Image: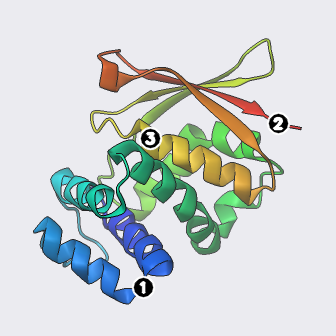
Amino acid sequence: MKVIIFNLLEEVVTGAHGEHAWADMIEVSGVSGVYTSLGSYPDAEVLALVDTAATLLGQSHADVLRGFGRSAMPLLAARYAHMFTPHRDARSFVGSVNTIIHPEVRKLYSGAACPHFHVTDHEDGALIIGYQSPRHLCALAEGFVLGASDQFGESVMVDHLTCMMDGQPLCRLAVRWLP
């Protein structure tokens, strides 16, 4: 996993729980804790940090990932404003993940293994997002969608229609905009 995820997680944790919280999570989880700007690190390290956070906060693994994704979006918008400014709403932004955002991620972070999203409009107005990744971090993707909605001043409801965690070949999320 690319260092950006570790950096964002550290910022989210310290922003919400103070500087000591990150050091405590590193110690409890047993990960190396040294993440340099151009590095790639085993997925197991971020998963160990998420598991530690889940235990410390009394939340599920999915809730921690969802909260992390949502909280990380303003940080991403501040760092990569050029990826946000062409979009007037979250629907447009989310729809650009495969064609604009992930190619930019691959330019910035050589070798990045980004998930793949299949984004389609449903006849009822929902945006259906198919998520595929060997990492099975669909809750993080859901958190990013919620965070994008917040970033654009919108409210959405996300329904997890199918999930890879339940043995399905891909996750399907239905995103509905609320009035």
Q: Secondary structure at mark 1?
A: loop
Under tag 3, what secondary structure? helix
Identified at 10% across, 68% down, the residue is: 30
* Residue in the picture at 58% in, 61% down: 73
Where is residue 5? Give x, y as percent. 37, 62
Q: Which residue is mark 2?
A: 178
Q: Position of residue 123 (x, y in %)?
A: 79, 11
Q: Which residue is mark 1?
A: 18
Is disc 2 placed on a helix, strand or loop? loop
Quarter of the rendering containing residue 46: bottom left
Residue 28 location (% of width, % of height): 15, 71
Where is residue 109, by image quadrant? bottom left
First in residue order: circle 2 vs circle 1: 1
Q: Which residue is mark 3?
A: 139
Of labels 3 and 1, earlier in sequence is 1
Quadrant occupied by the C terminus: top right
What amino acid is at disc 2? Leu
Q: Earlier in the sequence, mark 2 or mark 3?
A: 3
| Quarter of the picture holding the N terminus | bottom left
Spot occupied by residue 64 in the image (x, y as percentages of width and height)? 41, 53
The residue type indicated by label 3 comes to Ala
Spatial CA span between label 2 and label 1: 33 Å
Left or right, 75 with respect to 176, comes to left
Residue 30 visible in this rendered orientation of the protein? yes
Question: Which residue does the image show at 37% across and 74% down from the upper left?
Answer: 10
- Tell me which corner region of the image, top left, top right, bottom left or bottom right, holds residue 94: top right
Q: Residues within 10 Å of mark 2 (few under 14, many from 20)?
A: few
